[in-house]
Image: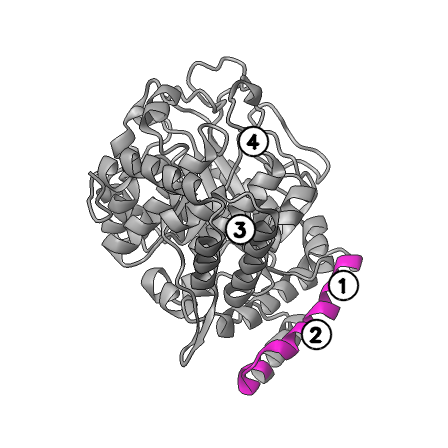
Amino acid sequence: MYDVRSLKAEEFINDEEILATLEYAEQNKHNRELIEQILEKAKPKKTGRGVECAGLSHREASVLLACDIPEMTDKMFELAKEIKQAFYGNRIVMFAPLYLSNYCVNKCVYCPYHMQNKEIPRKKLTQEEVRQEVIALQDMGHKRLAIESGEDPVNNPIEYILECINTIYSIKHKNGAIRRVNVNIAATTVENYRKLKEAGIGTYILFQETYHKESYEKLHPAGPKHNYAYHTEAMDRAMDGGIDDVGLGVLFGLDKYKYEFAGLLMHAEHLEAVHGVGPHTISVPRIRRASDIDPSVFDNGIDDDTFAKLVACIRIAVPYTGMIISTRESEACREKVLGLGVSQISGGSRTSVGGYAGYSAEERPHDTEQFDVSDQRSLDEVVKWLMDGGYIPSFCTACYREGRTGDRFMALCKVGQIQNCCHPNALMTLQEYLSDYASPETKAVGEALIAREIQNVPDEKRRQRAIEYLDSIKNGGQRDFRF
């Protein structure tokens, strides 16, 4: 039985409810009156407190996704852009993944780290190697990392992850510092989530891969990850362990995308109902080629147009969440979805264990890659590309470090007030990047952008203070100002 407040996976992600939702969506995909009502409900509304959005239920959003009327799809895209602008403006948060270990005891059939893959060498970073990787990332200009690791209680125990986090935060090289470490590791216990919280992590990220239980168990034939309920209930344990910000995601291509979409939104609704705060982020990866993995054997792949519509519908349904797209996707695909809802992207990414230190921007090791990287541009190239497109690349971590996480972040975001902090913070961290790491061409483009965008800070006192901070960064060398 479907129960959004249940703590049992098969009740808050209920197969019967999803199938009924998909049937309802199919029946109403040409119901223009209903679709117009759903779009009207989702529009940003100005209130005395700012801007608010109602969001959509999984059933309402599934109707939009199923609709194949071209002019209605155009309306969805316009609404997604309006919502994205209302809550995130033209800021795009930058991050990079850091792979710690590819030892794994699972047999996931879509991941090259599965224990039966004999093609890839197994590697685990020492703390000195972690240090070198972090310095390389700092020298690129990164301030925010997402650490990744296979599941192996012997080689990658929680103690190893915690030691790596401590090492990462301890390294200050030149003007570099990693200010936020997000963690993407296997489902674990409440006690271990408490330890991660105490270590100062930002967001705990765990991809569901697929919400279809039967498919899930076939795709994970052996290993701890085979347990569907334990994996699906992980976010509840993480929040019980004190982690405020959690990140959801599915691997599109493993099962039918409309089923995954409904399940993903039901999971977001469940977190909101039980914990009072929905997902801090939603990621939208698609399956990619890798060692021992041929994506063509999975017959649920989606084209770029469908992918763009998925992004737009997620943004409309869950207006306040951050949306992440990685270098799995090409430059052209990333450009298409940036305006439709994406608010975070990676740049200069390597998906190998030890993929940064000792390699130039043009070199990349392939022997331990988790997946093929489609967008292989350097961070500097991605930053300039974003600015040329009218976006503000942001290296900001202020909300996390000021305690504006979980329901405190969402309370500000839900009335559009977070932009009073985020806009100047984004510009100040961009100025740090330009002063310390950018090429001359990127620096020139960026400083012209900052001069224009600083005028869009509405509060005059805050604007003047931000201008003073920007001058200090450029001329005095001082760093890490934040509102």
Q: Is residue 142 visible?
A: no
Q: Which residue is mark 1?
A: 445
Per the rendering, the mark at residue 35 is: none
Classify residue 25 by image quadrant.
Answer: top left
Q: CA distance from mark 2 to mark 3?
A: 28 Å
Return the residue nearer the eye: 370 or 455. Answer: 455
Return the residue nearer the eye: 381 or 81. Answer: 81
Q: Are marks 4 and 3 in contact (CB under 8 Å)?
A: no
Q: CA distance from mark 4 to mark 2?
A: 38 Å
Q: Is residue 19 visible?
A: yes
Residue 88 coordinates in the image, percent (x, y)? 53, 63
Mark closest to the chain's N terminus, 2 or 3: 3
Q: CA distance from mark 1 to mark 3?
A: 29 Å
Q: CA distance from mark 4 to mark 1?
A: 32 Å
Question: For the point 40% across and 24% down, which residue is it?
Answer: 104
Q: Are marks 4 and 1 in contact (CB under 8 Å)?
A: no
Q: Which residue is mark 3?
A: 312
Give the foreground label among 4 and 2: 2
Mark closest to the chain's N terminus, 4 or 3: 3
Three-letter amino acid code at the position of disc 3: Ala
